[in-house]
Image: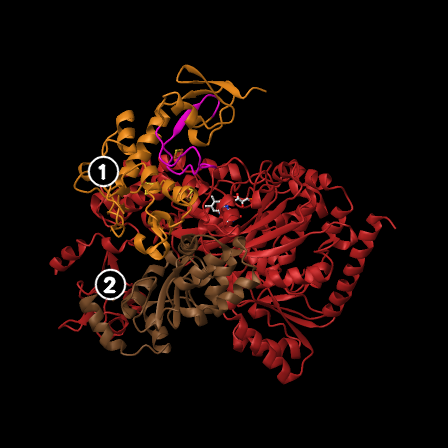
Chain colours: A orange, B brown, C red
Amino acid sequence: MSEQVTITIDGRELSARRGEKLLWAALRNEIYIPHLCAWPEIEPPEASCRLCYVEIEGRERPVTSCTEPVIEGMVVHTRSPRVDRLVASAFELIMSDHHLNCAKCPQHKRCELQKIARERRLRLRPSRLTALPRRGERDDSLKTIYFDSGRCVLCGRCIWACRELARVGAIGFSRRGYKQAVTTFGDLPLAETACTECGECVEICPVGAFSYKINAGGERESL
Amino acid sequence: MEIGGSEGLLPVEEILSRYRNDREKLIPILQQVQEKLGYLPLAAMERIARAVRVPAVEVYGLATFYNQFRLNPPGDHQIKICMGTACYMVGGQIALDSFERRLQIGEDETTPDRRFSLERVACVGCCTLAPVVVINERVEGKVTPTRVDGILLELGLEGLPEQKNSASEEGGKTP
Amino acid sequence: MSAVTEIGLTYAGLRRQAEEKATRLKAQAVIRIGSATCGLAAGAAAVKEAFEREISKRRLPVKVLETGCLGHCHAEPLVIISRPGFPGIAYGFVDEDLVELLVKNFLEGDDPCYEYALAALDPNDVFPTFEDFPRGVYEKKIISGESGIIDPKEIEQYLAGGGYGALAEVLARPPQEVIREIKGANLRGRGGAGFPAGVKWELCDRQEERERFIICNGDEGDPGAFMDRSLLESNPHLCIEGMIIGAYAIQARQGYIYIRAEYPLAIERVNVALNQAREKGLLGESILNSGFSFDLEVFQGSGAFVCGESSALVRSMEGERGVPRHRPPRLTESGFRGKPTLLNNVKTFCYVPPIIRHGKDWFKGMGTASSPGTALFSLVGKVAHTGLVEVPMGTTLRELVFEVGGGIPDGKQFKAVQIGGPSGGCLPESALDIPIDYDSLHEAGAIMGSGGLVVMDDDDCMVAVARYFLEFTQQESCGQCTFCRLGTRHMLDLLTAICQGKGDLKSLDTLKDLAEDIKAGSLCGLGKTAPNPVLTTLRYFREEYVAHIREGICPAKMCPDLIVYYIEPEKCSKLCNVCVGSCPVDAIYTREDGLKAIDQKKCVKCDNCLKTCPPQYQAVIKLSPPEKLAELEGKK
Ligand SMILES: Cc1cc2nc3c(=O)[nH]c(=O)nc-3n(C[C@H](O)[C@H](O)[C@H](O)COP(=O)(O)O)c2cc1C
Ligand code: SF4
Ligand code: SF4
Ligand code: FES
């Protein structure tokens, strides 16, 4: 059995590794699908942001591409009225809970939210929904990194990076539902945790929630 | 009063050893610790995390996920208002409001003197007696604002008449 | 001796012992006190004490048993007295005076005091049985039949009625035959979704991995439902037997009963039952000498509605946050500890022993073709006979509410029935002739759910009800996925505004659009069904939403921001003062003419004055919209 399969996305035939997740096959071939929570090494995927919906022929409803293993002959459409509606709705929901202030954000121009808006022609500012009250305060306790939970989209990638890449485990999800947040043990300031300021969280954060503090010279503050 | 120090945590050690520091048993461990100590002090959670070898924040994540766990010591008298469907339909909210007004605290809060704490709970299964409140494990049915005053008097809350006025004037809550 | 005869003999031995004990019990007078949570809350413990006191005072040879719930919760405290020579008789609303009377007249004397009886339990020439009442005509008890009759803490009482007979039968047959029987019966899962149990068992059995687990879902988080609690409190062995049979079918060696921590009595009784089953060789090594070994343990949930969802339940058992995961893989492939896991609801397991005992065709002879068997409901809200009822599938909602439930009390009008809890919907009068089965309810926008049924009347505001359920799901969402975490929050905000008279008509469209997106886009069943209460109320009671928005009127006069309390001067009596004392915030004062009036600035809308105003006056009324007040006051 060959390791490669042929699939069709938006009319383009491409080859992908058997069993790899559709989202990564598409992205590798420069077909963009919005996504926030997925990361190639995070297995199984959280599938929590609900942005990566696509249509697969033969399937009754849109499916999340980050959870869908590719199989030979799969025919995929990244856009359809149903997909567009779901993505627009999920995006507006996320933006209604995002402290929007791009000009002051270090992630400006590199932010995944801006990219989604650009690719799918969506407005950053919610139109039918009212913005929700800003969440949490900014944690400035570390020397080189800060955390602004008002920007956080709860994708969970930093938690994985802190645990699996940095092997520290300083942050995690706490609470539930609308109150769910990325916090430290006991909501302590980051400086009172085992955090080593390695920066893995900043590197993996798709938005500007974990960011480096920048000194006057435009560089990362040094430890 | 925060429980800390090695002495306060002795029961935690005992529980941990009973469960052989098994990570899978985190929830039963937390349940038993809370049963022993009344709540989950930060120091206890840190100790548990070390024993089962997970980051402390993971234990914190569990403790804040589940309704059952308390991070603060409860009041001497725990008042739980049933907010099941049947109770809600016939005045559960009114019962909750009445307790809040009298005790001048909100739900999930404890009076500053730590005598009373207020919680809402989902259906306790006595829908026929709605609205129901559970006072220290005892079920009280058909609770009206008058009955709320009666319950609080029985529990020894003094100075109701004065509070009556100040509550209506300030209407404020003490955090 | 062959294994098969050995099993039969072992069981026969247990059964004989139990029957002998039962015969001895039948020969004396027995008082059964309904002591499930409902009974205890209504005062069963005091009733029991009173009986014991009276009996010992009179030195009567009477046995007092604590049983579970007979289903007639509205009449608690409820007791059953059986005396040789008389039919068993149930008495409701028992208090200490009635206890004394019953002991004196019936246990010491020979007068069963029929004037206080609810019904007889056995057919007789003197007094009607439960079956003779409208409710009894519709009810068909196949899993709740022994509830309230047997002592849940005495395994022998379950054995004496043929309990564990199905297990003995099954152990003598190959496991696949059991699966075939359950599949053939088309038993559908009673936890909400109605997935065929036999198919699930088969899926689990097909896995290559031999280490398997079986879990019973007793999380019962629907805030108006208590069927599972009642079954576990009243007859725990039924569910346990069903689980052992299921374990044998898929050859699991270890199982768990997941019960929410809010159900301490159920946990206690199940633990007692497990110990007794172990002592009798019905659990543990080589059950009934069959060579099949299996054990069961209780896992206590910690209060999170979402943990009723199967993957979240398993995660919480593994010591994690109860967050649902994407499926596939299904639990039958990768469940507890990554092993094939069979998860069914309490009721689903309870149906297994009767199906094995009477056969699949007997089961299919009840209910409808697509949903055979019976359904167990907790009937609460504005209905005369609240309690637990078991009726064949296909019974209509109308029969359930008006015949079985005895209709709406206090001369009020039926308005809606909420079925399926936070995942279900509110159905109006026009939907009352829908037969209760999985598919018909789904079509109407509700779901079968696990069996919570709340009846509502004129005084219940449908917008407030929708808001109540949304507040619940919003609080209980695990919070991981976007639609559910944020979508329900926005829906709740919109509904709150409408209840305060602040919404606009456009917000109804937003509500509907959001609801559809949350249904389509959420990861797990919680999000996928959370909008149902809103969608059904929008579908059937749209005019109520519009009244809130357009006119600031809450037609049911329930939303506090859209009502004021008013004392009608024409009806108020100068001589009466009760409302003044009843007001917890001193908002009621006496006017110069001696009549009472309400200071609106102080009023907290607690409804107390309305409740206390004597029935001969009924002077306190609610007005909506609040502007009506100025109108009325201006008139004078
Ligand atoms: C949010 C949510 C809550 C649930 N709660 C329960 C519950 O309390 N009890 C239950 O048996 N099933 C519950 N379920 C359904 C379970 O996921 C599962 O389908 C069921 O337990 C399977 O058993 P059954 O096939 O016997 O119905 C819930 C599902 C969801 C999505
Ligand atoms: S801080 Fe960044 S990486 Fe971490 S959860 Fe929030 S958005 Fe995701
Ligand atoms: S739908 Fe709601 S409860 Fe289910 S996974 Fe998503 S956030 Fe959690
Ligand atoms: S990337 Fe698929 S759900 Fe987030």
Query: In the image, is residue A203 above or below residue C552?
Result: above
Say whether mark 1 and mark 2 are on the same chain.
no
Q: Main secondary structure of the magenta part?
A: loop
Q: Is residue C166 magenta?
A: no
Q: CA distance from mark 2 to mark 1?
A: 49 Å
Q: Residues within 10 Å of mark 2 (few under 14, many from 20)?
A: many
Q: Position of residue C632 (x, y in %)?
A: 16, 57
State the quadrant of the C terminus of chain C: bottom left
Q: Nearer the viewer, residue C181 or A90?
A: A90
- The residue tagged 1 is A106
Q: Which mark is residue C283?
A: none
Q: What's under tag 2, amino acid-wise?
A: Val
Secondary structure, mark 2, is loop
The answer to whether residue B76 shows anywhere in this view is yes
Q: Nearer the viewer, residue A157 or C18?
A: A157
Residue at (60% x, 43% y) in the render: C341
Residue at (75% x, 69% y) in the render: C24
Q: Nearer the viewer, residue C407 or C74?
A: C74
Q: Is residue B167 left or right of residue B92?
A: left
Q: Position of residue C550 (x, y in %)?
A: 21, 43
Q: Nearer the viewer, residue C446 or C179?
A: C179
Query: In the image, is residue C230 above or below residue B103?
Result: above
* Tag in front: 2 or 1: 1
Query: In the image, is residue A114 above or below residue C2?
Result: above
The answer to whether residue C382 shows anywhere in this view is no
Q: What's under tag 1, amino acid-wise?
A: Pro
Residue A110, image quadrant: top left
- The residue tagged 2 is C604
Q: Is residue A42 magenta?
A: yes
